[in-house]
Amino acid sequence: MELHRLSITELAGLLSTKQISARECVAYFATRIERINPALNSFVALDLDSALAKAELIDEKRAHNRFVGSLAGIPFGVKDLEDAEGFTTTRGSALFADSPKALKNSHMVEHFIKQGAIPVGKTNTPEFGWKSDTDNATFGPTRNPYDLRRSPGGSSGGSASAVSSGQVPFATGSDGGGSLRIPASACGISAMKTSLGRVPSVSQIPPGWSDLSVSGPLAKTVRDTALLLDLVVMPDGRDFRSQARKPEQWHQEISVKQPPVKAAFSLDLGYAPIDPEVSEVIEKAVSSLENAGVEIRVLDSLFSKDPLEEFFTLTDSYYAKTLQSAMSDPKYQMVDPGIREQVERGLQVTATEFLRACDLSFYMNLTLYNLFRDVEVLLAPTTAGLPPLVGGKAMIGGSEVVDWVKLTYPFNMTRSPVASVCAGISRSGLPVGLQIIGPHLGDLQVLSAAQFFEEVLGRFHPEMA
């Protein structure tokens, strides 16, 4: 049986009815990791022996009819920006590569473990999650399951690569500027960036990107994503941005809720050049949605400018706050020059400049608020270009560009819920993602639309050599 092709619900059903044991399940995926990971470098740390031992304990509990949880026996990966007990959290950086192993779990990891899921290892990330290509000097590059010459995107590229290639059914990630959606698009899977505060940021220190980044899972389908979100979306008094408890179970509601009747569509958000291979796939997908009964309103423009300058004002400030104390460490010179440049810029940002960037976020959200009076969701490509070659430059329309991901960070600034589903495969054989954006706290609305669109557009699997 090809367990890696099953949904989390299907896998959990086989486990709960004892058609397969937890040990058999973990062993199956451990074998895939050992066979596939050397080519992809999705995982940078593994403890498969411990995972198998935990699986055997679950089998013993299940044999005695003891509670084991809804995910009992299902292995998963943990992005190397968050803690998993027994693993070092390196953040992809030499600054933390020799740190002690974590003694506690992050919020998401803890709640998945409570339901019996088993962490098998840490997935690769660019240093401090700073860019849209998963590569760092400590562990090297991660590769795309659709084309080993290509990047899987970032910053949750290790997790997306691991899930897309069937090494684990799901993995954790985070999204401060597109870091769930970009690799999901590049690797042909689904992702959801929830409204800010839905998944609490729980720690003994203030969060790094407090008003931009949210944590979330990566899974192959929208339904699996919703199932996992139901376990981690909750209020927490330690995060004063966290939202009230939702009354519904999203993974159940998305099949009941009606698909959107009206949607707006912007190919470029008003400012971004789009690669012809991307626009070709996206426009075909939008046409398919129209044929399925969705009324599409094409927007001539949306935002008046690319908000990248203001986005960098915010992120430069966050990096300066986080890393200023490390500047005296001799290892700091090993930190990616791009990050050190951001720290230097961040130290020069004034409070007024920071607040003006926050003001632009406010006005952009107001634009969306007015748009959502007339439509239920907004559609746009997830990325402006195809994923670049590993170590190479991104290309749009045959020309080298610095930024191939111009379409994601605006919705971190507006705190909006956004999903990405695979719209289709480009002429180059690479997946192309479609973003579904909704109003603040309209997460269920976005998930329901994404579920419907995924069914209309189909699902895709890389042909692994």
Image: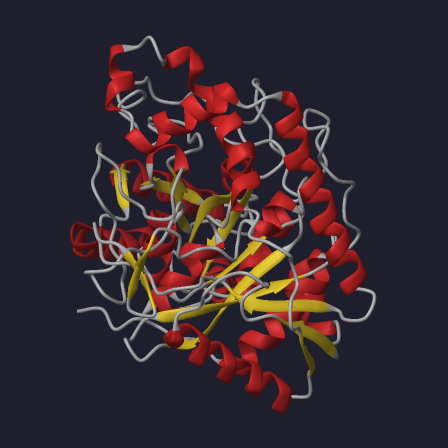
Does residue 213 appear in this view? Answer: no
Front in this rendered view, residue 261 or 12: 261
- Which quarter shows the C terminus? bottom left
At x 41% / y 73%, what residue is drawn? 278
- Decide if residue 24 is on the left or right side of residue 19: left
* Spot occupied by residue 430 in the image (x, y as percentages of width and height): 32, 71
Q: Quadrant of residue 39?
A: bottom left
Front in this rendered view, residue 40 or 171: 40
* Spot occupied by residue 322 in the image (x, y as percentages of width and height): 47, 20
Q: Quadrant of residue 101?
A: top left
Total numbered labels: 0
Determine the residue located farthest toward the right in the rendered image: 373
At x 53% / y 54%, what residue is drawn? 408
- Decide if residue 75 is on the left or right side of residue 358: left
Does residue 9 appear in this view? Answer: yes
- Which quarter shows the N terminus? bottom left
Q: Quadrant of residue 54?
A: top left
Question: Does residue 163 lie above or below 201 as drawn?
Answer: below
- Decide if residue 161 is on the left or right side of residue 71: left
At x 33% / y 26%, what residue is drawn? 88
* Spot occupied by residue 388 in the image (x, y as percentages of width and height): 28, 58
Determine the residue located farthest toward the top in the rendered image: 328
* Spot occupied by residue 411 in the image (x, y as percentages of width and height): 61, 51
Question: Does residue 390 lie above or below 241 as drawn?
Answer: below
Front in this rendered view, residue 189 or 14: 189
The colour style of the image is secondary structure
